Amino acid sequence: EGAANMQLISAPAAVKTEIDIEHDLTTGIGNVSADAAADLSVYPNPADDIISVTSAAELGSVEIYTLAGAAMMNVPAEGTSATVNVSDLDSGIYILRAAGTTTRLIKR
């Protein structure tokens, strides 16, 4: 007499989302990419205190920002390599910019 009609609607188990940061008008930081390692080398990364930054191009300066875009450090650099003391930074993920390239820096 009272037949029930049921329909099962399922959602996908996981949805993959990719986010590319092209340009942030607030910080002026553009194109955060893991591929930046080809142009800019930062080691060790993750870092505890001292990092070495090298590039095929002139560095000019090494700039470090929080993910929110706050400037934390701006270290003048001559040539294609620099040593930067990051021991005063809190543990976390930062954005490092040098020689026109932007990459991630992880501070332990």
Image (cartoon, grey):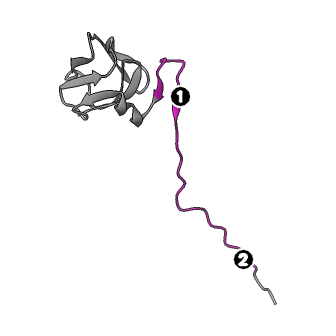
Residue 99: % across, % down: 37, 18
Q: Quadrant of the N terminus?
A: bottom right
Q: Secondary structure at mark 2?
A: loop
Q: Main secondary structure of the magenta part?
A: loop
Q: Residue at x 58, y 62 (%)?
A: 12
2 and 1 marks in contact (CB < 8 Å): no
Identify the magenta region: 5-31
Q: CA distance from mark 2 to mark 1?
A: 46 Å
Q: Residue furthest right?
A: 1
Question: Residue 108, image x and y in percent?
Answer: 23, 34
Judge by depth and name the residue closer to the eye, 25 or 60. 60
Q: Amino acid at mark 2?
A: Met
Q: Residue at x 40, y 35 (%)?
A: 35
Q: Secondary structure at mark 1?
A: strand
Q: Is residue 16 magenta?
A: yes
- Residue sticking out furthest to the front: 56
Q: Amino acid at mark 1?
A: Glu
Which numbered circle lies on residue 77?
none
Q: Quadrant of residue 2?
A: bottom right
The answer to which of 8 and 26 lies nearer the viewer is: 26
Identity of the residue drawn at 33% across and 11% down: 60
Query: In the displayed structure, does residue 6 sit left or right of residue 44?
Result: right
Residue 62 lies in the magenta-colored region: no
Q: Which residue is mark 2?
A: 6
Disc with the residue nearer the chain's start (2 vs 1) = 2
- The residue wearing badge 1 is 22
Query: x, y percentage for residue 51?
Result: 21, 25
